[in-house]
Image (tube, rainbow, N blue to C red):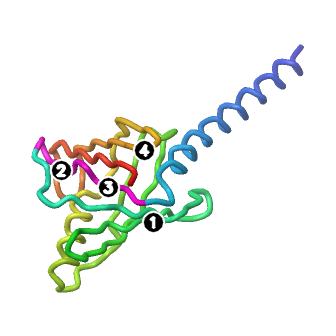
Amino acid sequence: MKKIILLASTIFIVAFVFTACNKTKMYANRLDGGDWKVTELSVDGTNETELPNWTIGDCDAYKGSCTGEWKNNEGGNGKFVWQFREKGKKFEISNQSELTGDHAQDEVVLQCQNFSGVYDVIEHKRKSMKFECSATLGFAGKKVVIKIEKE
């Protein structure tokens, strides 16, 4: 009887861990490898005047960092790393670019830096996602929303 209980417990734990990992991977797979239009980038309900686009590279979250490009309409291009965690309930984004002195480039780097943080995943659909955070690098204590749509 003890062996059956031990075996059943082991199977349950393995299934639980496998399911948790698969959910995070499923979320990451929906985001990676494509172009996304940012349709909302707001702070306390006020949307940014210039909305960026994201290009997400192919990624295996278990083999390395997932990267993306934060682009504006003036030719600026910033790099960021991203990841889903906590079974897909959290989304983290972190700026990886530095200021250069070029206006378009610096504008995109500052925007990406200010919106870096750990977000709650509010909506996660195949072609749209919504994230909220109140502890971003540039807007601590304010409600920040990012909404993206697949192009």
First-in-chain label (3 vs 2)? 3
First-in-chain label (2 vs 4)? 4
Label of residue 7 in the image: none
Write the residue at 42% across / 58% down: 82
First-in-chain label (2 vs 1)? 1
First-in-chain label (3 vs 1)? 3
In which quadrant is the N terminus drawn?
top right
Please state which of the two labelled residues, at mark 2 or mark 4, is closer to the viewer: 4
Label of residue 67 in the image: 1
Mark 1: secondary structure: strand
Q: Is residue 123 above or below residue 74?
A: above
- Amino acid at pointer 2: Ala
- Disc 2 marks which residue? 140
Tell me the CA gap for discs 2 and 4. 29 Å
- Disc 3 marks which residue? 37
Tell me the CA gap for discs 3 and 2. 24 Å
| Range of residues picked out in magenta | 35-45
Mark 4: secondary structure: loop
